[in-house]
Image (tube, rainbow, N blue to C red):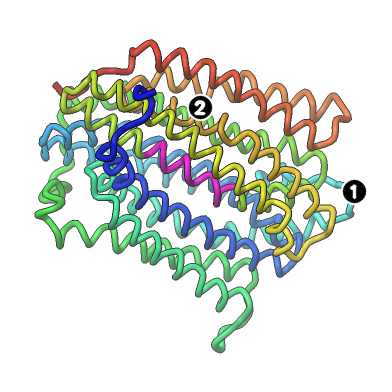
Amino acid sequence: MNRYIGNKAFYRKLFTVMIPIFLQNLITNFVSLLDNVMVGQVGTEPMSGVAIVNQLLFVFNLCVFGGLAGPGIFTAQFFGKGDQEGVRQTMRVKLFVAAGAVLLFGGVLLRFGGDLISLFLHEGEEGLDLAATLRYGRDYLAVMLWQLVPFAAGQIYSSTMRQAGETVLPMKAGIIAVFVNLVFNYVFIFGKLGVPAMGVVGAAWATVLARFVECGIVMIWPYRHRDRCPYVEGAFRSLRVNGALFRQIAAMGLPLLLNELLWSGGMTTLNQCYSLRGLEVVSAFNISSTISNLFFCAFIAMGDAIAILIGQLLGAGELEKAREDDRKLLAFSVAQSLVVGGLMALAAPLLPDLYNTTPGVKALAVRLLLVGAALMPVHAYASSCYFTLRSGGKTVITFVFDSLFTWLVSIPAAFFLSRFTAMPILPMYVVVESLALIKCVLGFCLVRSGRWVVNLVK
């Protein structure tokens, strides 16, 4: 049993890394819930329009996360080795990736945003207004494009600080930003303090303002604390990157970038398949996913902690300890997901009532939440396996494990069931989500093989 349970020092170190990330995600998702509820007070069509646009922006966000994850593997290992110049060069690679993502997605969304929103608009049983939903979505997207730059720039600094063990400051910046978002949502959406009521456009401007605040904090703080963040000294004085290092990062980072791009695109495609059952399904998924994210942030923070802790051990050359600690981290991830899943099941019948929408949408959202709670341990274990493999640079394997699985297994199942059967949305969702059990078996075999136990920065 000691193989799967650590001592006090082990959990103290885990919680030191994990809890700030968890709290930031928890507060971010809680305020996102309040934000979502505020937009939902305006009506079902505005809420659906915003939900569709956020699904498209989700692809951009994951592309940035995935693009920065490749250099981030080296950031954690260079920091574990004590090589500050190596950390600086990984920051420069992150800058190139972030700039490319902003230009690509900004151009696509500016030119084809309305067409992409229309893909999710289908008649359902409750006769919701599709044209109004499209109009709300386009108005919201036009403003949200302004937050692409501060989001990407902030991620360069916050991801580097986390990978170097400084997790508290990004947490504080995130907390400040979400409260800025919350306050200005209230002011802009409903028209308070002399400001005209702007509805979904006001929600978008509140988000843009919050992004700039968060970006400013995480970019300024490291330069005022250079003793704790020595790698920022001269980080962008030059944009030069060692050629061999760049090729090595590209070889490992490109599969990660493609993985996040294809995975997030896959999630969006899955939601588009579900949307064929009607606009009320889009609304119910928006409610259930916003509430689910409040609980899912526990195992998401656990995944980040695994990547940081195991990455630092590998970079320091403690390969056997990395293997032993990872086994205990995987066990803890599953145990915590059982507890959190139970809490989510208890909350499922209550939280959808916060929304100003139809009884049918609320009832479907409750059932979707119960399915998510039951399958949380499955997703937690698969996620932990993914971050374990990634910490050792096995990005091609993670690409197959994550994205190819989504596109070759989950999406064909959803595509077939949504278009060639009359299966109702709930059993369809259960079938598609249960396919993650295959990922758990695959993840177990890959982690047990030990091929990920590699020091990349010797």
Majority secondary structure of magenta residues = helix
Q: Quick check: 27 left or right of 225?
A: right
Label 2: few (<14), some (14–19) or many (≥20) C-alpha neighbours in 10 Å: many
Is 293 colored magenta in this rendering? yes
The disc at residue 125 is 1
Kindly tell me whether residue 95 is visible in this rendering.
no
Q: Amino acid at mark 2?
A: Ala
Tell whether 324 sits left or right of 260.
left
Residue 256 image point, x, y percent: 40, 28
Name the residue: 49% across, 20% down.
401
Mark 1: few, some, or many residues within 10 Å (few <14, many ≥20)? few
* Residue at image location 18% in from the left, 41% down from the top: 239
Q: Name the residue: 22% across, 32% down.
A: 312
Is residue 265 a member of the stretch shown in magenta? no
Question: Closest to the observer: 76 or 16?
Answer: 16
Position of the N terminus by quadrant: top left
Q: Which residues are magenta?
A: 292-304
Image coordinates of residue 51 in percent, x first then y, are 65, 53
Q: Choose top left, top right, bottom left or bottom right for residue 88.
A: top left
Q: Between label 2 and label 1, give the one nearer the viewer.
A: 2
Q: Which mark is residue 382?
A: 2
* Three-letter amino acid code at the position of disc 1: Glu
Residue at the farthest front position: 1
Residue 341 point in image, percent of width and height: 59, 42
Residue drawn 56% across the image and 89% down it:
194
Q: Secondary structure beneath disc 2?
A: helix
Above/below status of 288 relative to 426: below
Q: Sequence-wise, which precedes: disc 2 or disc 1? A: 1
Q: Vertical placement of 439 versus 311: above or below?
A: above
